[in-house]
Image (cartoon, helix red, strand yellow):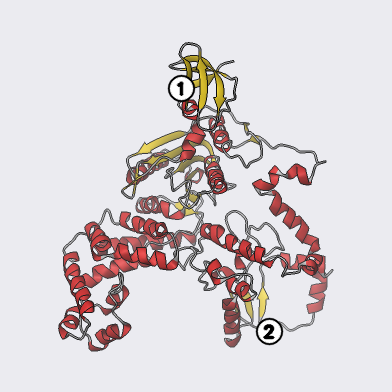
Amino acid sequence: MKLVRSSTSFFKVLTLYKKWCMIKLIKDRKGEKMRRSSGIIMHISSLGEKYGIGTFGKEAYNFANFLNRAGQKYWQILPLGHTSYGDSPYQSFSAFAGNPYFIDFDLLHTEGLLQKEDYENRYYGNNPEYVDYAALFDERLEVLNIAYQNSKGKVDLTEFKKQQQFWLEDYALYMAIKEPEFLLQFNDYFPNLNKVILDINYRSVPAIIEHSNRLILCNKNRFNKVMVPHKTGTTKPVIINCKDDNEQADIIINKILELKGKKFPLENIAIIYRNNMQAYSLLESLINLSVPFKIRDSMPSLYNHWITKDLLAYFKLAQNLSDIEHCARVINKPARYISRDILKNLQQNNINLVTLVRQGSLEKWQQEALEQLIYHLQLLKTKPLKDGITFIKNVIGYNNYLIKYAEYRRLPLNNFMEIFNEIEASCQDFDDYEQWEENLRHVSESIQNNKNKYIKDAITLSTMHSAKGLEFDIVFIIDAVDEVIPHYKSTTVDEIEEERRLFYVAITRAKENLYIYIPKKRHGNNMEQSPFIEDMLFADITLNVGNKIRHKRYGSGIIKAIDDKSATVKFDKTGIITIDHKFCLKKNIIEIEE
């Protein structure tokens, strides 16, 4: 069996490394008989993998052996390069470098470079049908760095560097230069080079550039560059405070319908968000209103998510206590300690939960748990959909199950609660679970169909990560609230600065009009405005001892002492007063006098 890459890079390697050429390859094959054969096209990322993406590990070898046994001759695996922004195999940083995501953790464990606890029980995504590249970026690269640190002194790369010198150094240099940390040390490595500062933004109107400069200036670990607008224009970013995420969605959809009615090109509109689950309610509205859209990232299907399947199983079991399939799914969610043998007995003898309890064959604690479940299912049967989901979560105990499951998997509970909240929000307009399930199925099919066809005039939905390099006349940024952007997992200074760069990317996608939405509630929970909003709105002015300032209440004064939190000022009329200088600057209470 042969591996085939649909990329010219294979021939580049032969040309540069083996000194072959296309003509020689053709001559070498001249006279060979072309036999009829068959094979399969499938990317490595599609292989079954419990750590978020397919790799060149055991599953790859198993699949190759399967194809061989099946009499197949070719496996077309598509480009394997190190993907850049957008994560497309056809957009790579290098024609030669392999994608680090395809490195197999279990093989690194076998080599002694990783321990199981280094890579197990991490969050690599929540749907096996999709690759969550944002999660891989956060988790897999961190694991590979652990392996690299463990490899020092154990792995000799001298021969590899020698063999791959025709591309490796340039690739390594490029990958290093594109990191902000390297730019800060650029002069240390290349002291005699002339620098050309590319500080002109040709995309956005002046007000967007002004806001983005204020934002990114708050990052300390950055190259000292202030962008200058090339365009003219008077439009300014609009920040909209909303009652909740539902009102946020309504405002955006109404604005889009207004633009659509005016024949505004939808391809010039984008909705940008921190993570892909945030867009679900907007996506549902776009589908129901027949507004064309295209999604830059893989969008997890609520219909196929295991939490959704669990909730539907409870509703269906409440309708039919003899439904063994759905009973088996949720009988131990939360734990009721019902064994597989008991479930097998139910199935083989075609008996329901009530009969099982009456038989008296269970332990006392098992019987009590099932009696309580039957009682709860009878109550669930009478409840409308929204109340029923709350009942399953809080009374039947599904919330406790999620807590225990998160602890067992050593994953943040928020990973699951975000999904549950999105599921809960998706049921708002439905009275019963059957209507809700049908709508989930419809949305899931629409998303899948959308992936398989090219739509020119369509709204773009994208995460901040995947929006890099794009531009639109109108940009809507949703959920500009704390713990979303910056993400709740980002706690260190470096992580916060990376989140701020993401927000910078999002706002600078807008050419003319930028709308930023701040819901006061999200999924029923109170939210705080993202700290990046203040960063963006107020300039970071540096005050020093000796500066003369004017205070709106105290008048003119001179700064006598200052630290990160407060400044001691001697005012002409009121004497020495200590003020919170950062708060005063942001609220325009003080200004510097010349």
Residue 199 vertical position relative to residue 147 in the rendered view, above or below? above
Residue flagged by tag 1: what amino acid is it? Ile
| Location of residue 139 in the rendering, given as x and y in whole percent from the top left corner | 54, 60
**Which one is in front, 95 or 70?**
95
Residue located at (54% from left, 51% from top): 465
Mark 1 crowd level (few <14, some 14–19, many ≥20, 10 Å Cα): some
Residue flagged by tag 2: what amino acid is it? Arg
Image quadrant occupied by the C terminus:
top right
Label number found at residue 91: none
| Location of residue 490 in the rendering, given as x and y in whole percent from the top left corner | 50, 50
Mark 2 crowd level (few <14, some 14–19, many ≥20, 10 Å Cα): few
Residue located at (62% from left, 36% from top): 202
Give left or right: position of 478 versus 77: left
Q: Secondary structure at mark 1?
A: loop
Residue 18 vertical position relative to residue 517 in the rendered view, above or below? below
Give the distance between the C-alpha atoms of the residues marked 1 and 2, in whole angstroms.
Answer: 82 Å
Image quadrant occupied by the N terminus:
bottom right
Give left or right: position of 314 versus 6: left
Residue 497 vertical position relative to residue 409 in the rendered view, above or below? above
**Which one is in front, 371 or 407?**
407
Give the quadrant of residue 233: top right
Give left or right: position of 189 versus 314: right
Q: Which residue is mark 1?
A: 589
Q: Which residue is mark 2?
A: 35
